[in-house]
Image: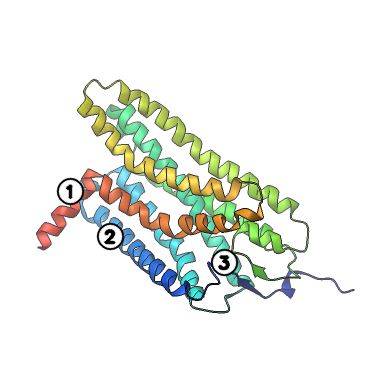
Amino acid sequence: MSHLNKTEVIMFMFSGLTDNEQLAPFLFTFFLNVYLVCVVFNFGMMFVVLKASNLHTPMYYFLSYLSLVDLFYSSVIAPKMLADLMSKIKLISFYGCAVQFFCFDVLVVTEALLLSCMAYDRYVAICCPLLYVLVMTNKKCWSLVFLSFSIGFLQSVVQTSCVFSLEFCGPNLIDHFYCDVPPLLHLACSSTLWCNSITFFFVVVCGVGSLMPILVSYTFIVSSILQIKSSKGRQKAFGTCSSHLTCVSIFYGAVFFIYLHPPNTALQIQDKLASVFYTVMIPMLNPLIYSMRNQEVKRVIKKALHIHH
């Protein structure tokens, strides 16, 4: 019997979001609008931060990079998902799948680390306000952003190499709408023990490792806010954190639901719904949350609209 290796599968096929042909046009229209809103608002957020001099602070520096990451990581998934909604045969090449997997993995981990950097920024601003300018220098902010992208890139190189060095010699139907670890490992002909271990390791290290600084930062932040005597002062201090807390809760809730629950075929539909929220909805929601809940951003947008009018 000849040796079977991964090159024997040169194309993968997605099961897609739905096999209901009547539902597909509605989903296409809905998610096309979601993606367009995502592109417009993330570009808009970057433009507002760039042009408004009063937003040239570390918090909005991190926010502009968060918008950049959201823009790219939704673009890795959404256009292909939209095309597949209107296609009966949903194909992607082996190497196209590897590229999609690699890019998405880089950007998701980078997003988690940027959220962690933003929590640290809020901690310094609220707990050490007199030292804020000395601590959050331009060089330090740039270093934190560079470190976030570097860790995302390096861990994705390891994960992608591990997954796509497996043997794929049998079924090529990925029961999903994009290339992700669990459905790909399910198709592998060779042992996936090592890849499962690598995936779990990176979810714990990058996921929990980025979440812990957020939890520690907000423990100190809440303690400091409670010590503020005036209710107006407490409200103002919490207001600067509410947008970030909302984004963190949505992001980590979806991530841990998808990657840390035990395998169960009954959860496949819920997994897809959570994945849609995680890959398409969150990149749209982040700039909306910041533009609606952050008073400084709202003031800049209102001023811009007023000048234009």
Q: CA distance from mark 1 to mark 3?
A: 40 Å
Helix, strand or loop at label 1? It is helix
Quarter placement of the N terminus:
bottom right
Residue 257 to residue 68: above or below: above
Q: Residue 28 lies in what quarter of the image? A: bottom left
Q: Is residue 144 visible?
A: no
1 or 2: tag closer to the N-terminus: 2
Q: Are marks 1 and 3 in contact (CB under 8 Å)?
A: no
Residue 150, percent from left and from top: 51, 51
Crowd tier of the residue under label 1, counting other residues whose Cα lies within 10 Å: few below 14, some 14–19, many 20 or above = few
Q: Nearer the viewer, mark 1 or mark 3?
A: 1
Q: Is residue 296 visible?
A: yes
Q: CA distance from mark 3 to mark 2?
A: 27 Å
The three-letter amino acid code for the residue at tag 3 is Val
Helix, strand or loop at label 2? It is helix
Residue 21, percent from left and from top: 51, 76
Query: In percent of the image, x 70 and y 60: which residue is there?
Result: 186
Crowd tier of the residue under label 2, counting other residues whose Cα lies within 10 Å: few below 14, some 14–19, many 20 or above = some
Residue 206 to residue 44: above or below: above
The three-letter amino acid code for the residue at tag 1 is Arg
Query: In percent of the image, x 27 and y 37: which residue is there?
Result: 239
Q: Residue 123 lies in what quarter of the image? A: top left
The number of numbered discs placed on residues in the rendered structure image is 3
Q: Nearer the viewer, residue 60 or 308?
A: 308
Query: In percent of the image, x 36 and y 29: which residue is there?
Result: 221
The residue to which callout 1 is attached is 299
The residue to which callout 2 is attached is 44
Q: Nearer the viewer, residue 284 or 42?
A: 284
3 or 2: tag closer to the N-terminus: 2
Label ID, residue 37: none
The residue to which callout 3 is attached is 99
Helix, strand or loop at label 3? It is helix
